[in-house]
Image: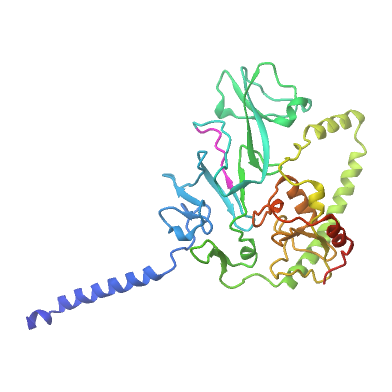
Amino acid sequence: MVAKANNPMAKTKTLALLLFFFFKSISADEDDCTPASCSPAGPQVRFPFRLRGRQPARCGFPGFDLTCNKRNQTLLKLPSSRSFIVKNISYASQVITVDPDFCSPDGVAEIKLTGTPFDFSIVESYTFYNCSSQISGFTFQTLPMLPFPCLGSLNHSVFAVRTVWIPFADIPASCDEMATISVPTRRFVDIRDELTLMWFTPFCRSCEADGRTCGLKSAGGDTVCFGSSRGIPRSAKYGLSIGIGVPALVCIIGLVCYAFGKARNYNHGQRQNIDLFSIAITPQPPSTTGLDVPTIESYPKTILGESCRLPKDDDGTCPICLSDYEPKEVVRTIPECKHYFHADCIDEWLKLNATCPVCRKSPESSSLVTPCSSMSSNSSDTPTE
């Protein structure tokens, strides 16, 4: 027994076993919520998202699970829709961009966000047409239609046109209407390339602006910023804004003047075409699900002073347009949750949505400011220091 205990081979095995359990215990204690991705070229996945099967559930927020397919592409599965390939995730803007994939076997299908934490950025309605003959193109007067070659064949073509343009378009008689769908997109972005979804909860823009990461504070669902701020000081930001903004403003003014000068040389026929086009692209009427103008105007407004100081230190940026507040700007606050916004930004938002864009609480459920108190607040809009 003594000879066996003194065997060098036995000692080596015992030491290796001890080292194995030591390193295993260390790795178990390490933070396994580090960013991940399905491929080197794929989007980085971190809070509030998580890769199912690669990151624990505590690394993400409920409803933000992503997966990888056999081609190492990142997928977002919506409960009431099919899976979409994720092209990009902007954590600072809280926007996720997905591939619409109209060429999939499901074809033309509307995206439904019921039961998801996502919201539409801008909703556009498109009508799809099946044309019995190949159509090479359209003139300016008939308005352009988006071709979808993958949905057509040698004997027919498939096109899509914005629904608001249809009354002004000359749709060929050989085209039959297939379907009308609403899709989330950004202005001037081709719906064949990408669709955009936004989220407001959890709200991590302040963490991203400071160069820190956002995560769960506890099992209760509260979020907190982790790490030290790596951003540049606010004074340096103002200096850069002035140094870059003034020359840029001069260039923009010059370009606008040049454009107006060129516009004066257009003939009357061209002006009529432009007028027709401007009427055709008139945006859809706003939704009636928002608040009425008197209710919105009853919310307090404040004119910022030179310091742009607000009650909370982290309220220096408008959550809607992501621009820092400037002196003399007018901000409006929602009485129930005390969140501040540019007055123009929150007015347009509340006309379409009856909830706060930050906490999603409904202002209608709060005790609204009376007309008298609103008049007093607005009449005392002195600059706040």
> Quarter of the image holding residue 259?
top right
Judge left or right: residue 330 versus residue 108. Answer: right
> Quarter of the image holding residue 235?
bottom right
Q: Where is residue 183 in the image (x, y as percent from the top left)?
A: 63, 38
Q: Where is residue 226 in the image (x, y as percent from the top left)?
A: 55, 69
Judge left or right: residue 98 versus residue 308. Answer: left
The prevailing secondary structure element of the residues shown in magenta is loop
Quadrant showing the C terminus: bottom right
Residue at horizontal 44%, vertical 48%?
68
Judge left or right: residue 222 versus residue 383. Answer: left
Nearer to the camera, 367 or 344: 367
* Count of residue discs: 0
Judge left or right: residue 141 versus residue 231. Answer: right
Q: What colour scheme does the image use? A: rainbow
Q: Where is residue 207 in the image (x, y as percent from the top left)?
A: 61, 65
Q: Does the magenta stretch include residue 3?
A: no
Give the magenta range: 97-104
Q: Is residue 192 placed above or below 215 in the rendered structure?
A: above
Nearer to the camera, 313 or 28: 313
Quadrant showing the N terminus: bottom left
Q: Is residue 153 placed above or below 274 in the rendered structure?
A: above
Q: Where is residue 191 in the image (x, y as percent from the top left)?
A: 63, 38
Residue at horizontal 76%, vertical 67%?
240
> Quarter of the image holding residue 124?
top right
